[in-house]
Image (tube, rainbow, N blue to C red):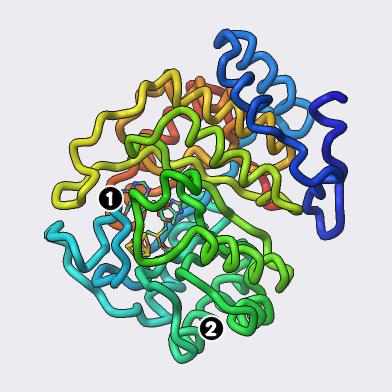
Amino acid sequence: MSISSEVISGQKGATVNIFKNAWPLTKIQALFELPFNDLLFKAHTVHRENFDPNAVQISTLLSIKTGACPEDCSYCPQSVRYDTGLEKEALMEIQAVVDAAKAAKANGASRFCMGAAWRSPKDRDLDKVTQMVEEVKALGMETCVTLGMLGDSQAKRLKDAGLDYYNHNIDTSEDFYQEVITTRTYQDRLDTIDAVRGAGINVCSGGIVGMGEKKVDRAKMLQTLANMEYPPESVPINQLVQVEGTPLDGVEQIDSIEFIKTIAVARILMPTSQVRLSAGRSEMSDEMQAMCFFAGANSIFYGDQLLTTENPSESADHQLFKRLGVHPAMPS
Ligand code: SAM
Ligand code: DTB
Ligand code: SF4
């Protein structure tokens, strides 16, 4: 069976796995073990079969509620448990969010992603967030929010407001997960993804590499994503941004070739998903990012800040796109 015949196009533009658990771990590990050039050739071929190889989707992030989060995610500067010197900020006013979205649109972003440092939103928080979604959507942008755990009725409210994507990462393998987060389970995350999918919202889910996980954890994380009944439409691959004060500050960094391989394997396993070269680009050279695009990454966060940490400047990204002959992808 060829790689691309393992999936077929399904309803709502999502891709349905016709064979659940289509990817056994051994096959994924075998991809990671391929010589680098063989793996990249395979990934790039799959990429070309499914996408314009020179188009990169552009999303801009805004932290709409910052810090003081009760969760203990060991990578995160926004957890109340770690002293990272971050100033907390209450949920932003709607107009300020709309103004930021307008500016992002004027700068070329097609999707606006709003992030809140919550374990899960309260229903009254959603009153405000649903209005933000409606108003940003009215600007002609795709909308994405990441608000923590979500129940079915909350997901439905966001869908009714017109939300296009919900970001909720599985972060790593189920095995390694408990070494990173103790305040919510892996199953909690999968349940939220099910609620989002059930409401008919596109799923954005990926993880973080470079947290001290083993190779097998990266393979298992991608296996979990690829073997979902509907793999996520958008798969952010974050390289850990080490932040002073967090437990993961100082952990051994991931080898850059391993990072590129992770992108390539994600592309092969999820041929029609957008694979986002997500956090960590400030620490990557242009050449490294170019290799990631060749390996199948076709989406980035654009704008000089992620949620609370640094991202490459807009002018650096303009230069990069120009050097590579890459152009922003049109919204689908
Ligand atoms: N609080 C919500 C939640 O965790 O679902 C939404 C915001 S949270 C900051 C979104 C994602 O950002 C996390 O799941 C994690 O994958 C990523 N993230 C957070 N801190 C990071 C860091 N230091 N480096 C890389 N990715 C990070
Ligand atoms: C995702 O996978 N990465 C983004 C977004 N989804 C919300 C967040 C990255 C956060 C990096 C640390 C920070 O800036 O606080
Ligand atoms: Fe809170 Fe999200 Fe950060 Fe975890 S990743 S501490 S849930 S803001």
- Say which element carries label 1: loop
Q: Is residue 126 above or below residue 115?
A: below
Q: Quadrant of ligand 1?
A: bottom left
Q: Amino acid at mark 1?
A: Thr
Q: CA distance from mark 2 to mark 1?
A: 26 Å
Quadrant in which residue 52 is drawn: top right
Please report whichever mark, 2 or 1, sits nearer to the chain's N-terminal start: 2
Residue picked out by circle 1: 309
Residue on which the image places disc 2:
131
The amino acid sitting under disc 2 is: Gln
The answer as to whether callout 1 falls within 8 Å of ligand 2 is: yes
Check the image and report above or below for 167 versus 318: below
Report which quarter residue 90 is drawn in: bottom left
In the rendered structure, the answer to whether residue 72 lies left or right of residue 17 reads: left
Residue count near mark 1 (Cα–Cα under 10 Å), binned few <14, some 14–19, many ≥20: some
Determine if residue 281 is in view. Answer: no
Which residue does the image show at 67% across and 47% down from the upper left?
Answer: 330
Q: Residue at x 65, y 26 (%)?
A: 26
Label 2, residues with CA under 10 Å away: few <14, some 14-19, many ≥20? some
Q: Is residue 307 left or right of residue 156?
A: left
- Percent position of residue 34, x then y: 60, 12
Q: Quadrant of the N terminus?
A: top right
Residue 92, visible in the rendered structure: yes
